[in-house]
Every structure is written in C-alpha cells, then in structure tokens.
Amino acid sequence: MTERLYLITFFLITIFFISPAFADVIEPGKKVITFNYQLTNIQDYPDYVFVLHGTPGPTLQVLNSSEFSFYKLSTGYIYAIPSSVFNPFNWDKMNDTEVEEFLRNDSRVARSNLSLEGLYGSVNMANPLESALVLLRIDSIQGNNLKIQRTKVIYGYSGGQKIEKTFQNQNQTPEFSLPESAYLNYLYYLLLPLVAVVVLIYVLKTRKSS
C-alpha cells in the first residue's frame, strides 16, 4: 500500500511539472499567451498600405496604428504596398495563392524579412501574466526592402500592471518578470504541491515506523 502511494505521489508531481506539448491544445493547469503587435510609426508613411500575410493565415490583413494579432500557430510577415497600387485591387476576390504570389513577386511591393509569431507560449494558470505586446518600428522603405525592428515588449498582468522590456537582440524576446506584488502569490502556488508531498511522505514514514 505504501509503495502504491509513493507511485501515485510521483505520478502527480510528474503531471504537474512535466506536461506533454500539444500543438493546438491547452495543457491542463496552463494558459496560452499570444503575441500582440503594434506599428508605432505607421503614420510616417502615408503613401503606403501595410499588410500582414501569414502561414497558415491570415491571407491579407490591413494594418494601422492599432494593435493586431493573428492565429497563434501562424508565422506572419509585413509588406508595404504603395496606396496607388493597393487600392485598385479587388483583394476579397483573390485566393491565398494569388495574394501570396503578388506579395512575393510584384516589383512594387516592399517586403520585410522579420518573422512574427502568433504564440508567445504557455504559463501556469496562477501566473499573473496575461499578454505580450511587441512594439514595431518601421525604419525604412527602399525599393523592395522594408526594414522593421522590434523595439520593446510590454507584458500585461492581471490587475492592470505592465512591465516594459527593451529588445537587445531581434531574435530573442526579453523574458517577462513578475510584478513584486504578484511574486509571493505565484511562489506560494508553485511551492504548495511540494509542501503537500513532503507532508504526505512524512505521514507515510511515521505510520510505517509506528
């Protein structure tokens, strides 16, 4: 009986800390955090229409100064199209292949090589992290080259708190840090199962020795 309880305890610890990864399924005890993005200086380029095209979606998403997001398992790229070129097209009548062909091959389109991911990751349900907003800055449009930089990521937490981190490397998102007010609650959540296991083992050993 004692060995069985040990096995059950070990199994519960394993489930809690080491959950298998599922592509589009939320793991038990976890919540998914997606990326939001915002072009902070789009107003400096009034002669262009900026669009997002992603795989597997969206086919075509027109961007403005507001925050935007897309399907969490997609990878997206931003394109700049002169307004005089963009407006005559009937985009709603074009399928995904036609849109992709135009964006990749038309000489009038400026393309960014900055890949944007829809998914930030997953965290424990008790984690106060709620959102991750990446601020983007358009540096230049030269011919077919659209240069965009990630500048900052703003992490949002339950209760309305925000923490801002600056990008030091375009290929690495700065890690979030917990607000001081939420740190102790989160630590308590993580330590509680361990404390419960220690108490259970102590009780089992006490009963065995008595």
Image (spheres, grey):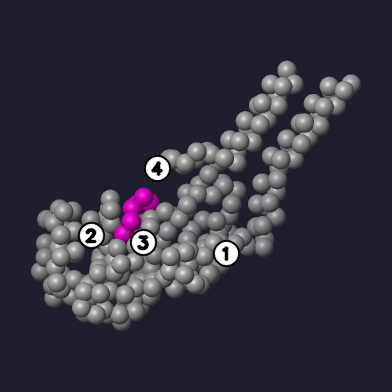
| Callout 1 amino acid | Gln
Provide the secondary structure element on which disc 1 rests. loop
> Which residue is painted at 34% across and 73% down in the image?
148
Kindly indicate the quadrant of the structure image that contains residue 194.
top right
Callout 1–callout 4 Cβ contact below 8 Å: no
Q: Are marks 3 and 1 in contact (CB under 8 Å)?
A: no
- Does residue 160 appear anywhere in the picture? no
Judged by depth in the image, the label closer to the viewer, 1 or 4, is 4
The first of marks 2 and 4 along the sequence is 4
Indicate the position of residue 201 as horizontal and vertical percent values: 77, 31
Q: Nearer the viewer, residue 131 or 190?
A: 190
Q: Amino acid at mark 3?
A: Leu
Which residue in the protein does label 2 denote? 60
Q: Which mark is residue 35?
A: none
Residue 74 point in image, percent of width and height: 33, 53
Image quadrant in which the N terminus is located: top right
Q: Quick check: 149 left or right of 186? A: left
Sequence order check: which comes first, mark 3 or mark 4?
Answer: 4
In-image side of 199 versus 51 (left or right): right
N-term-proximal mark, 1 vs 2:
2
Q: How far apart are the alpha carbons under marks 1 and 4?
A: 28 Å
The spot of residue 36 in percent (x, y) is: 41, 61
Q: Is residue 75 magenta?
A: yes
- Crowding near the residue tagged with mark 2, few <14, some 14–19, many ≥20 C-alpha atoms within 10 Å: many
What amino acid is found at the position of numbered circle 2 in the picture?
Leu
Dominant secondary structure (helix, strand or loop) of the stretch shown in magenta: loop
